[in-house]
Image: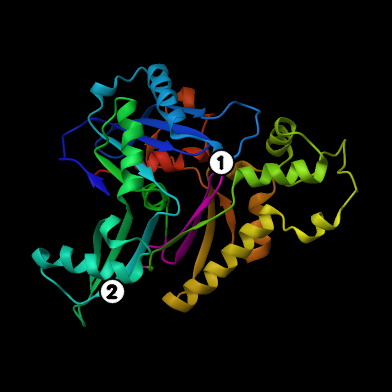
């Protein structure tokens, strides 16, 4: 999205600014891969306090980022390569096919083409693109379009500027998820489904070495799992959060769920059911659009990927092998981090590993 002039660097920082927490990853660039120097995860809302998303203000982010950088002993002025990302309703990614055009004509042509595919006003659109391939027989170009609104991009860069940061590149969440996976997984042919479970939404990406790229957001995340537990077990927010990370989708064997099911409970889908329903719908759409149903595996990342029983639930419902993704194959891990590998770092690692 936003790109500054390339610079030579030995160290790189990826920053994932989520609605509930911020993740910062500091990597050293090696001849082959990267080394983890440090990382920090910190909530942006008071621990144990229920919150309403619409009540949260952007002003809360910068002070948290400043404190995190102090903890990591990183001076903003010393950062030579910083990559962050944006997501949400006003971002969009679409793979399209178009006739071959020379480079000097391509950008202006794609801007008009993007208006047909991306639901953002043309005057407010910030557009980036990547040529994926040129087909030999037809000479058509397969192109990945990425767009956001000027307002969303400006809000994000202002948050970072308030913390003393100037990113070299602002990516889109779904592309960072795909980058993290592509650089940290042993993949064969076929199609892979990536679910990055955030606090309020899940980035869904369908990716493969030779597969059509697809991305969308599912409007459910960790917040919704906690609300489910509050409703079903008559718990307060703080207790429900603790319960979620201890028992996941299961029951506390010493304290079975209270069997007082209301009509509201019957009519409301659980968060895991809602996510699976959206996942199935997207897979059907992908098969119809791309003509490819060779789904090899579903990978979960993000904070809620750690919920006990979630991989098994999704695998049972969509009949595709499902597991938690740990994005560290090409990241050398010092001994002190070996027992701290965390799937919620996937997006920040994908950002830090982004070279251009």
Residues drawn in magenta: 188-210
Give the image location of residue 18, x and y in percent.
47, 39
Q: Mark 1 or mark 2: name the one nearer the start of the chain.
A: 1
Secondary element under disc 2, as helix, strand or loop, is strand
Give the image location of residue 246, x and y in percent.
72, 35
Q: Residue at 80% of width from left, 46% of height from top?
A: 232
Please tell me whether residue 288 is drawn above or below residue 179 in the rendered image: below
Q: Is residue 108 magenta?
A: no
Q: Is residue 202 left or right of residue 88?
A: right
Q: Which mark is residue 295?
A: none
Residue designated by label 1: 53
Q: Which mark is residue 97?
A: 2
Please tell me whether residue 54 is drawn above or below residue 315 in the rendered image: above
Q: Residue at 63% of width from left, 61% of height from top?
A: 276
Give the image location of residue 42, x and y in percent.
50, 27
Task: Mark 2: give few (<14), some (14-19) or many (20+) Cα within 10 Å.
Answer: some
């Amino acid at each position: 999205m936003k790109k500054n002039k390339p610079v030579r660097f030995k160290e790189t920082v990826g920053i994932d600014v989520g609605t509930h927490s911020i993740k910062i990853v500091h990597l050293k660039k090696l001849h082959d891969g990267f080394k983890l120097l440090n990382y920090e995860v910190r909530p942006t809302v008071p621990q144990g306090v229920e919150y309403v998303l619409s009540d949260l203000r952007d002003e809360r982010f910068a002070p948290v980022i400043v404190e995190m950088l102090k903890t990591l002993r990183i001076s903003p002025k010393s950062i030579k390569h910083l990559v962050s990302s944006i997501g949400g309703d006003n971002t969009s990614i679409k793979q399209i096919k178009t006739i071959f055009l020379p480079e000097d004509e391509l950008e202006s042509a794609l801007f008009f083409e993007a208006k047909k595919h991306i639901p953002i006003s043309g005057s407010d659109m910030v557009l980036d693109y990547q040529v994926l391939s040129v087909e030999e027989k037809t000479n058509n170009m397969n192109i990945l379009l990425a767009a956001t609104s000027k307002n969303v991009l400006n809000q994000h860069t202002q948050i970072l500027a308030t913390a003393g940061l100037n990113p070299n590149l602002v990516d889109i969440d779904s592309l960072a998820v795909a980058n993290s996976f592509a650089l940290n997984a042993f993949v064969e042919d076929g199609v892979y489904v990536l679910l990055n479970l955030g606090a309020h939404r899940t980035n869904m990406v369908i990716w493969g070495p030779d597969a059509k790229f697809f991305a969308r957001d599912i409007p459910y995340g960790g917040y919704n799992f906690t609300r489910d537990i509050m409703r079903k077990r008559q718990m307060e927010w703080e207790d429900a959060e603790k319960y979620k990370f201890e028992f996941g989708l299961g029951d506390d064997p010493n304290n079975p769920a209270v069997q007082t099911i209301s009509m509201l409970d019957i009519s409301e889908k659980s968060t895991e059911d809602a996510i699976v329903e959206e996942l199935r719908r997207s897979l059907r759409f992908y098969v119809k659009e791309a003509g490819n149903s060779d789904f090899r595996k579903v990978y979960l990342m993000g904070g809620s990927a750690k919920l006990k029983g979630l991989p098994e639930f999704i695998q049972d419902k969509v009949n595709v092998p499902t597991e938690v993704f740990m994005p560290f194959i090409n990241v050398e891990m010092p001994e002190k981090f070996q027992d701290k590998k965390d799937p919620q770092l996937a997006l920040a690692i994908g950002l830090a590993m982004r070279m251009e």
